Each structure stands twice: as C-alpha cells, then as structure tokens.
Amino acid sequence: MNFRVARRFALTTTAAALVLGLASCGKEDSSTAASGMPVVSATPHANVPPPAGKSWVEVVEVTPDGGYRVGNPDAPVRLLEYGSLSCPHCAKLAQDSFKKLFGEYITSGRLSFEFRSFAIHPQDVPLTVLVQCGSPDGFVNRVEQVYANFDELGQATQRGAQAAEQALTLPENQRFVAMAQALGLTEFFAQRGISVDQGKACLADFTKATQVAKNAEAYGAKGISSTPTLFINDVQTDKTEWNSLDAALMAAGLR
C-alpha cells in the first residue's frame, strides 16, 4: 500500500467497516467543480469588534459536523473548507492563504473560517486525531503546522509506510499509536504542544479514530468528492487556489 496515494482504506470498528478514500485530492478545475452562484456583496462589510479581552482568532467552536470554526460566529462571510491533511493541494492553499485569512480577514470580524478534516488517506486518521488532541483553540494552529511542514511529513510517511501498514493489524488501542510512531507524528506534535504521552492517549482511544472515519463517511454522503472543497456562505465555489479564492472573498464583501 502506498500511503501517499492510497484510495481506499478499511477502518474496521466493532460497529461497521467504514471505508476511507471517498474523495480525491485535486487542484482547481472549474470545468468539473460543482458550484452555485457566486456570493456577491454590493458594499464592503464593516469590521466587527471582538469580545472584550480577545481577538477573533481566539474564538474557536467545535461544530456539529465535526469541524472547527474560528472567528466571529455571526460574521457576514463564512468560509468552510473540507480538507485532507495529506492533500498537497490543500497544503498549498493553506500555505498561500493563512497569513491573510488569519492576519486580516478573521481578525476583522467579517469572516469566520471552518475547517473539516476529511480523512481520505490512511495517515489522515492519526493526523486528524492528533490535531484534535488538546484544546480546541489550538486546533487551527496545529493544522497550519501540518501544512507548513507538508514535505517533511510526506518524506516521513514514505519512510514509515511499511511499518504503518503493519500497525493496522494490531489491537484497536495500539493500532494508531503504532502508525503515528512509524510516521514520526508523535514526535512532530510533541514539538508543537502535544506531548508524546498526551498524543498516545488520544491515539489509543479508538472512538476518536472511529469518529474521524464516520465524519469522512458523512462528508462523502453529502457529495463532497474532492479536497479541498470550499463553500462561501453555504454556496460551493470552484475557486480552490488562493488568488481566485481571495478574489471571490473580496467580491463577497471583504474588500
């Protein structure tokens, strides 16, 4: 199994065999992406003051669909991303967008950003469990670190692919601990605020991995078929590269 391009992966639980690989990772292709009418605002939206003693980037909420939303929950512009933590196109979008999204748009109170981790490759399961391990307000920073160090993690995945595949035969409470260790993930996150013991405890809780798989199944059932898939104010956009997405956000009122 090639852990970088694997298309199907059975995560067996006591309840069901949930299949990952419901979506593909791909760059912008306006000829095939489904989208609605572009979101357009005739006038720019005004800045919204944050709660006392906070900035909007410190306001984080776990959403019912398994996402993490950052920013003003009543922002006039809402950006939603279904992204795979092992998708190079998602990584490129994050690398290009995070500075402006978090340094300008979200801090203004005019934009909220929700990220839903869509597990489409085997390594997405321990990656998602680990970015969710710890306080919710650090979630997006951990996602950003995965994407900022994407090449390094990809090389570790290639080196540890065989051992990671063997880990899938272990008992449930050992399976993703061993996979994460084989891929260098526990040490990676230990350098970013999730201690080795804390990471292992999260990975040993098989209900967390099961929920990641259930979320992936639910996203696929909604028709999400590629990552990144993005919505602006509940309208899907085919603008999945930052320059065109930024233009769409500005048209929606962030200019």
Image (cartoon, grey):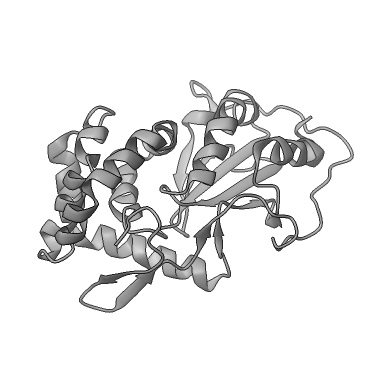
Above or below, 60 against 39 in this view is: above
Q: Nearer the viewer, residue 226 or 39?
A: 226
Q: In the image as oriented, which residue stretches furthest toward the bottom?
A: 16
- Residue occupying image coordinates x 49% and y 34%: 59
The answer to whether residue 31 is left or right of residue 145 is right
The answer to whether residue 94 is left or right of residue 194 is right
- Residue occupying image coordinates x 32% and y 58%: 2
Q: x, y (%) of residue 35?
A: 73, 60
User: Which of the 4 quarters of the picture holds residue 104?
Assistant: top right
Q: Quadrant of the N terminus?
A: bottom left
- Residue occupying image coordinates x 81% and y 57%: 37
Above or below, 121 against 186 in this view is: below
Q: Quadrant of the C terminus?
A: top right
Q: Is residue 188 visible?
A: yes
Q: In the image as oriented, which residue stretches furthest toward the right?
A: 42
Q: In the image as oriented, which residue stretches furthest toward the top?
A: 53
Q: x, y (%) of residue 229?
A: 59, 54
User: Which of the 4 quarters of the picture holds residue 34?
Assistant: bottom right
The answer to whether residue 158 is left or right of residue 200 is right
Q: x, y (%) of residue 241?
A: 65, 42
User: Which of the 4 quarters of the picture holds residue 200?
Assistant: top left
* Number of marks in the rendered image: 0
Above or below, 30 against 72 in this view is: below
Q: Is residue 51 visible?
A: no
- Residue occupying image coordinates x 60% and y 26%: 107
Q: x, y (%) of residue 233?
A: 69, 51
